[in-house]
Image: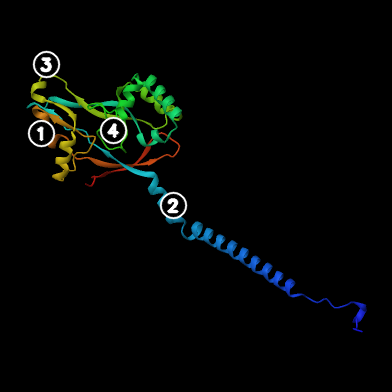
Amino acid sequence: MASTGAGGRRPRLRTPSAVKGRLRLIVVQALVLSLFVTLFGRLWYMQVLGGEAYQAQAAEQSVRELVVQPARGLIVDDMGRPLVANRTSWVVSLDRTMLHKMAGDEQSTLLRRLSRAVDVPVKRIEAKTLLCGETGSVAGTCWNGSPYQPVPVAEDVEQSVAVSIMEQAEDFPSVLVESQNVRSYPAPYGINAAHLLGYLSPITSEELDEAKAEHDTSVHGASVVGRAGLEKQYDKYLRGGARLQAGRRRLDGPGARRLRRGRRPRR
């Protein structure tokens, strides 16, 4: 008869199945622990070692460059009196990229609100934001510039209206307001010399292609060029050279904050 040992207890025998189960438990625990260690290690690497690199990448994505055309040169007579000058005009523009990210009902509400503010019909605003070549676009009204450039929808806006839109930015997402230089014809002594001075109009696609072929970086899709008269004859001297302006986009806001300017756009 087998001895029960000290205290009268029978020794416990471990079966092979119990040993295997314990080994499985240890393996699972080791796997879970290694996963947590890997996760925390990766998190530490992203936050500590690679944090600056990821911050730089995020900043790059929030900054984009806009082409800015400089103020056009003056045309003066032999006494220095301006025949063609520039004046400041408040211009309201729409950011197509942000507008298209909004829901359909939000777009409609925004366009109606903007239409009331600048006194431009909704249909005309929609026509101006269409890219030339898109379905429904109308030549002369559609946007011939870059699809990433803000599209002007109202010019010569009263300063009180411009300031009101800027102060209520949360009600006008994707709407930008800025002052721009536009052409002015003083007509000294009441003489209108339009037939000699000429006029300006947006650059055509053929002219833009020709400029690209000649590596002319002074024009872009949103440029205006001289037509007839002195505006055309001395156009390349009057228009100057376009510059790139960097702006930091707000993810929840209306527009871009200027960061720097001064670099010529590359072709």
Residue that label 4 marks:
134
Mark pair 3, 4: CA separation: 46 Å
Rendered location of residue 2, percent (x, y): 90, 83
Q: Earlier in the sequence, mark 2 or mark 3?
A: 2
Q: Earlier in the sequence, mark 3 or mark 1?
A: 3
Residue 84 image-quadrant placement: top left
Residue that label 2 marks:
55
Mark pair 2, 1: CA separation: 47 Å
Q: Quadrant of the N terminus?
A: bottom right
Would residue 27 appear left or right of 184 to someone viewing this image? Answer: right
Q: Earlier in the sequence, mark 4 or mark 2?
A: 2
**Kind of residue at disc 1:** Tyr
Q: Are marks 2 and 1 in contact (CB under 8 Å)?
A: no
SS label for mark 4: loop
Residue that label 1 marks:
234
User: Who is closer to the viewer here, 105 or 17?
Assistant: 17
Q: Please rate how many residues cluster around mark 1, counting C-alpha atoms within 10 Å: few if below 14, some from 14 to 19, many from 20.
A: few
Residue that label 3 marks:
189
